[in-house]
Image (cartoon, grey):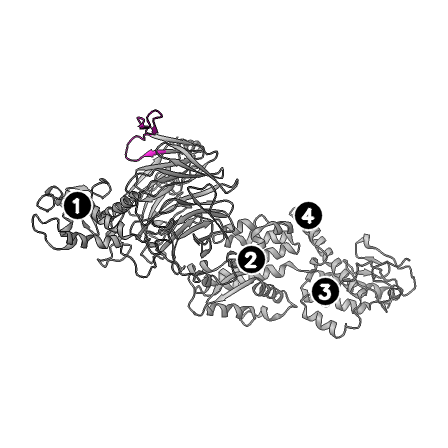
Amino acid sequence: MTEPSAPIAGPSNHGNSAGTGTRPDTNLLRQFVLEYLQSHGFDKALALFQQGISDQAVDGAANGSGADKTNTAGTGGVNGEDGTIGEDGNNNRRNSGGGGEGKEAIFRAPGPVPLESNVKRNIPQAQAISASTLSNSITPEFEAQAKYIIEQLQAKVQASTNANQDQDGNAGDDTNKELKDASSQDSLLDPSDRVQGYKSYKRWVDGGLDLWKPELDNLSFPLFVHTFLELIHFGFLKTARDFFEQQSTHHRPFHPQDISALSSISTKEHVQANPFAQRMITDKYVIPLSRNANDLVIQWLSGAGLDEDWESGLHTAAGRAKEAIKGIVFSNISIQVTSSSVPLDKITIASRSGLIASALPSAMPIEAFNTATNLRLGAPPMTEKLKEQVARTLQDEEPAQQQPNGIASPSKASTSTLPNGHPNVNGVDANGDIEMGSSADGVNGEQPIQIDNNEERSGTPIPNGDSNNVTVEQVKLEPELEKKKDPSLVSPEENETLPPIPAVFRIPDLKREVEAIRDKRKMIRLGPQQNGEVKAGSSSSTVLPSVVAFTLFDQGESASSVEFSKDSSLMAVGSSESCIRLWSLKGEKLKKKSIDPTDGSLLEDEGQPFRKLIGHSGPVYSLSFDPLYGSASAPSTMLSSSQDGTVRLWSLDTYSNLVVYRGHGKDPVWDVEWGPMGVYFATASRDRTARLWSSDRVTPLRMYTGHLSDVNCVKFHPNSLYLATGSNDASCRLWDVQRGACVRLFMGHTDSVTTMAISPDGKLLASAGLDSSIWLWDLGSSRPIKKMYGHRSSVQSLSFSADSSVIVSGGLDSTVRCWDVKSPGGEKPLVNNRQNDSTTITTSAGTDDLQGSLPMGPGRGNWEDEPHTADLLATWPTKRTPILKTHYTPRNLCMVAGSFVPPSNVSKGSQQANGQ
């Protein structure tokens, strides 16, 4: 027989010729294999091995043979007389060195593999054996022989399992692929250890106190992910798929994006190509725990609890399951323990958990990162010259609104207050926004405005004929010009805004500031009354906004974006047909201006009810009117972004395209917004970046990179120093506009962030998205204030009231909802006893399940019965109009818009069938 290149297991002459000394001792080899299989929990393989030993002993006794026979893989071990390996005929070898002592099997095993990295992998028992009794006998030939025996046993068990599955009709391609993909080294592992370890942890959490469940259950998600990825890595594809399908349901409500990403993984190649899987492998998943919760986890992992199975050691399945969980916790999870023993609330848990290391530019805790930079959130300054001119303009206008004797007009003096909090002037609901040019209609605080503003504001009666008292006027205007500055907020300098405040003010600046004072005088105070000491959330004490809804008919699903102008005079609608439609909300015709080429005079046409702007080559996803005049006048330009990767600047005088901005390549531009002072604007794109532009340049000025997925929305801070972005990676970021650095990271959403809003006072950030929840953040401390939920579908738009006390949201569930910003929130108990309420609309079961119907349409139940937080002030459902845009006027009146979705033909057919 020719000597092979690799060590073989066989007669002693092979071992001698190979220079390895004596051949492996069959008894010692048998003892080693038995202990290895027992310590690793290979119960089926161990049973086969022991059965083979028993059969061999019986055969030896019957034949009167006392020779030792090598026991290897197979149903009956190795038959020493015929030299076969169980039933594996392909591996049959005959010992040509005959003799009456019996024949030993010869195995052509693979090359020697270091025992430290294969057989003894993390096995203290095997290490102890090799250090004592086996230290002198473990040769490369012995290693190869033991490894080959274990592999054959494992393959035999797997083949038997596959045969049973084929008989039951359950065997599939995944099982065969699992056996094929599993390497020789990986087949030494038992997948049940990891699966049972995760299930045991879940049973321990579910059986514990409810006080600690939110924290401990949060730890189960990274355990689930790493268990699944390890099963894929070691080649147990069918086991991994079954484990994923059984356990992913529990995590899908809190991690929908991550579960969706994992659902596409079925092979090792998929793991390498999946970004989320690679982040889970390379980064440590951060889990916040209170001190007591951390002690409970350590106690459970150490086996000091009441579960006796954990103290059984590695020689039992329960002990190995614990070790699998312990390895994941210590290697792939970063537990951040708080100094307090008080259980963490769900908002804190959600905002501090996740793969934070890859989201931060430097390796530091998220709390340290968010507090490293002090923000200047104060209002932008106003020059002294502009203040003087604003005061002078208001003083010149107010005497003309009074009678010659300086008292209020009798026709306007009779006022009262309607139940909704709006002023009632002579029986008419004067909500302050009907006459946009008059300062007499509206409210100031909780009391109606009188024409004699001097008496109401100064509190001192003015004699007849002395209405032009300059001192009283200056006292009245000074607090309004100061804008009630918060001493805790730091305002930027005049040269720090974007663009810098000019030393000489412009006419648009004067008009904007004057109109802002008028709007403030007429602003309606919204939300629960604060001075009456009435509990927040009480409907009887709540002043809600007036809401007007604009419904787009015959649009189908082509309306992709809607925008209102600052002065509420124009509405623009972008469609998937690559065009923009423009309407006047005042009922006026839109006149196109042009210049006469002969004499250079300005010409206007007769006007049209609406204008259509054509220029994009893809759906229009976002629109933004220029804010230069604020609410004082109609805008003159408009920006639009599209799927074609461009941003276009339109003139609202000539209704033509002026400039095309290209910088995001071929990636769609999801959002565009003007800066609060004009000139500059920002864009968000699928290329994972946000960019800053100047209207006089066709290339971007700044690029903001850091998000891990599409940037869906951008929002400027009122003082123009900061830019907020929301992304598909379920996070929001706040950027320093000038430096291009990220200064805040907000995490807590479980799905993509689609819309944001910053309060007019500059303190709060609201974000919402596909998870149907609204998060409220404090920009200064970067801490989450509360989570508001009640929508049944994704939220498309958010808008703060002018006094930052109320926020309005619109969603694809065809509802507009009003939320109290000042309320602490919290879950509100459901109202279940409404069976006797005569106002409740009851419908048949068939009506609720009609195809083509929208969530909570007409006759689909009571909104109070739906889960929501206590800070939900009101819900206004539409018939079949998903809300695309919400807009608050400076006087706290709300405007919303959406496209009507007609019932489908299937729904109509079902209705007719039910009627027949």
Q: Is residue 750 left or right of residue 629?
A: right
Q: Residue 277: percent from the left, percent from the top?
A: 58, 53
Q: Are marks 2 and 1 in contact (CB under 8 Å)?
A: no
Q: Identify the element where label 2 is drawn.
A: helix
Identity of the residue furthest to the left in this view:
464
Q: Which residues are magenta?
A: 582-609
Going by the numbered disc 4, the residue's amino acid type is Asp
Q: Where does label 2 land, which residue?
A: 224
Q: Can the viewer see residue 685 in this picture?
A: yes
Magenta-drawn stretch contains 311: no
Q: CA distance from mark 3 to mark 2?
A: 27 Å
Q: Are marks 3 and 1 in contact (CB under 8 Å)?
A: no
Instruction: Point out the image quarter for the C terminus.
Output: top left
Instruction: Point out the image quarter for the N terminus.
Output: bottom right
Identity of the residue furthest to the bottom in this view:
132
Q: Where does label 1 land, which residue?
A: 398
Above or below residue 631? Residue 600 is above
Q: Residue 811: percent from the left, percent from the top?
A: 39, 44
Q: Where does label 3 land, which residue?
A: 119
**Closer to the eye: label 2 or 1:** 1
At 17% across and 53% down in the image, what residue appears? 457
Q: Identify the element where label 4 is drawn.
A: helix
Q: CA distance from mark 3 to mark 1?
A: 93 Å
Q: CA distance from mark 2 to mark 1?
A: 69 Å
Seen from the viewer's position, the closer of residues 719 and 499 is: 499
Q: Are marks 3 and 2 in contact (CB under 8 Å)?
A: no
**Residue 141: quarter of image:** bottom right
Q: Where does label 4 land, which residue?
A: 166
Going by the numbered disc 1, the residue's amino acid type is Glu
Q: Is residue 24 left or right of residue 870?
A: right
